[in-house]
């Protein structure tokens, strides 16, 4: 019970993918005899970051949440766990794939995709390959090649224009990617598949 001279305060923090393993009740009750000021400092800073929503605030909040979870898990009988890292990386990879599907004509690179997913680019490349069997850039190029087949068949656009429309850095890179996927050059594909 709260006393007038020492009122209780509570903070509610909703975090997607965070679960308690404390029992059937579905919650964990922790008595903090020390360190609560530091935890409240982290929670207040998370709230400030979320309200201001400045660039990079999600990363700051995620880092502060990690600090809170580690410190809570030091308490006896606490069993807080975030969702398995595999589930998180799977969700982030799916986000990247959907982004590529909607933006494949833009000038994308691995650094941009990693920033979008808030992941290290090397980790993203590894996780994406594990999830979908290809690297993010290979997936990007396959989406572009898929679209280029339509443009080669149905339009009279030059190869240079098609490469430009689809976000390829050069005509030679477009031709190289196309040949790798289709086994023939873009010109040969057009010749064989004209309507």
Image (cartoon, helix red, strand yellow):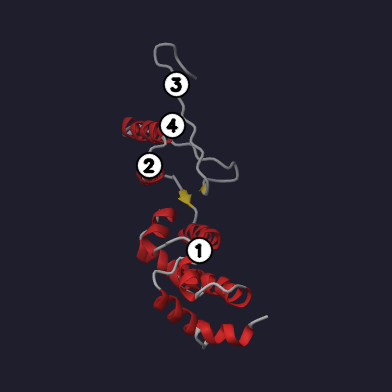
Of residues 4 and 57, the one nearer the viewer is 57
Q: Which residue is mark 2?
A: 55
The disc, 2 or 3, on the residue closer to the chain's N-terminal end is: 3
Q: CA distance from mark 4 to mark 3?
A: 24 Å
The image quarter containing residue 41 is top left
Structural crowding at the residue carrying mark 2, measured as other residues with C-alpha within 10 Å and reported as few (<14), some (14–19) or many (≥20): few
Q: Which mark is residue 104?
A: 1
The disc, 2 or 1, on the residue closer to the chain's N-terminal end is: 2
Query: Between tags 1 and 4, which lies in front?
Result: 1
- Are dots 4 and 2 in contact, CB under 8 Å? no
The disc, 1 or 4, on the residue closer to the chain's N-terminal end is: 4
Q: CA distance from mark 2 to mark 1?
A: 24 Å
Which residue shows up at 63% across the image and 74% down it? 154
Of residues 66 and 94, the one nearer the viewer is 94
Which residue shows up at 61% across the image and 87% down it? 192
Could one spot residue 125 in this view of the protein? yes
Q: Left or right of 22: which side holds 61? A: left
Q: Which residue is mark 3?
A: 8
Q: Left or right of 40: which side holds 16? A: right
Of residues 37 and 86, the one nearer the viewer is 86
Q: CA distance from mark 1 to mark 4?
A: 32 Å
Work out whether 138 lies above or below 112: below
Q: CA distance from mark 2 to mark 3?
A: 34 Å
Residue 97 image offset from top left, x and y in percent: 52, 63
Q: Which residue is mark 4?
A: 51
The disc, 1 or 3, on the residue closer to the chain's N-terminal end is: 3
Query: Between tags 1 and 3, which lies in front?
Result: 1
The image quarter containing residue 72 is top left
């Amino acid at each position: 019970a709260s006393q007038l001279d020492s009122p209780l305060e509570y903070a509610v923090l909703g975090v997607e993918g965070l679960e308690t393993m404390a029992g059937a009740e579905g919650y964990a009750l922790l008595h903090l005899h020390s360190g609560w000021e530091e935890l409240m400092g982290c929670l207040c800073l998370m709230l400030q970051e979320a309200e201001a929503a400045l660039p990079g605030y999600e990363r700051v909040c995620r880092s502060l949440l990690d600090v809170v979870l580690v410190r809570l898990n030091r308490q006896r009988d606490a069993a807080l766990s975030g969702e398995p890292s595999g589930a998180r990386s799977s969700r982030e990879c799916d986000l990247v794939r959907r982004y590529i599907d909607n933006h494949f004509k833009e000038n994308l690179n691995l650094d941009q995709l990693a920033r979008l997913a808030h992941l290290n680019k090397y980790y993203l490349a590894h996780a994406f390959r594990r999830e979908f069997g290809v690297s993010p850039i290979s997936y990007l190029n396959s989406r572009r090649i898929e679209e280029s087949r339509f443009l080669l068949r149905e339009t009279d656009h030059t190869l240079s224009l098609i490469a430009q429309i689809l976000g390829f850095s050069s005509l030679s890179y477009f031709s190289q990617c196309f040949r790798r996927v289709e086994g023939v050059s873009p010109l040969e594909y057009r010749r064989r598949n004209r309507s």
